[in-house]
Amino acid sequence: MGQTVVLTGLVLAAYPYGDYDKRLVVLTKERGKITAFAKGARRQNSSLLAVSNPFVFGEFVLYEGRSSFNMMQAHISNYFEGLTRDMEGACYGCYFCEMAGYYTREASDETEMLKLLYQSLRALLNPRISRELARYIYELKAMVINGDCPVDFEQMELSPSAIYTLQFIAGAPVEKLYTFTVTPEVLGEVRNVLNQYRKLYIDRDFRSLEVLEALR
């Protein structure tokens, strides 16, 4: 027998399914990464039309069947509409969501990744923060959360400021990550480190990153 559950999460991706439905990938606090179907979500009069899109964050009321979830309704606290109206912002957001999908799993505790993704999408809408810096903060912290990279940056040939920046990102709580800026020189050093780390620790290409880099 199925049951109704309420999960807090963020929609990572949405795909057409059948004639009028959508298949959603949702990163949730309680169940990790799940797949949910939103029936009729592509109909203009559907109550699920606005809530079954990437970046949407809130509480989702789902019917949990034997092998899948069906979305019944949602109580949304942030649509991140500013990203959907901005081509560059949308590309960054899609990349962040795609990387979150790469790292997260079903039925696992993904609380830290969900917090990181949420705060990182907020940072993309903050004009005081360089989006390129936000990208490198997100990449490094995602790797650290998932145990994918060393944090002994003092062994690298970097300036003291770059070492401090990397150490801060690796060790700071998610809520404190997007509270600083760096000089163009330090940003360049951080860029080089993260370019190396992606090649070393991530075994796939991200389509959204290819699109993002083509825009630059």
Image (cartoon, rainbow, N blue to C red):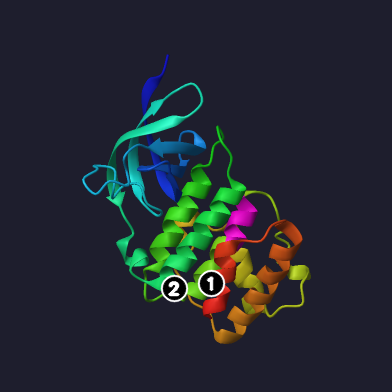
Residue 51 position (above or below residue 36): below
The 10 Å Cα crowd at callout 2, few under 14, some 14 to 19, many 20 or more, is some
Where residue 102 sits in the image (x, y, percent)? Answer: 60, 50
Span shown in magenta? 139-145
The residue that label 1 is drawn on is: 212
The residue that label 2 is drawn on is: 88
The three-letter amino acid code for the residue at tag 2 is Glu
Earlier-in-chain disc, 1 versus 2: 2
Residue 107 position (above or below residue 151): above
The three-letter amino acid code for the residue at tag 1 is Leu
Where residue 124 sits in the image (x, y, percent)? Answer: 42, 68
Give the quadrant of residue 162: bottom right
Residue in the foreground of this view, choosing between 21 and 123: 21
Where residue 110 sits in the image (x, y, percent)? Answer: 53, 41
Q: Is residue 89 left or right of residue 85?
A: right
Residue in the foreground of this view, choosing between 186 and 64: 64
- Our reading of the magenta stretch's main secondary structure is helix
Give the quadrant of residue 23: top left
Q: Is residue 136 visible?
A: no
Q: Is residue 73 visible?
A: yes
Q: Is residue 204 left or right of residue 117?
A: right
Q: Is residue 144 magenta?
A: yes
Quick one: which residue is furthest to the front in this view?
19
> What separation in Å lies between label 1 and label 2 (alpha carbons)?
7 Å
The N terminus: image quadrant: top left
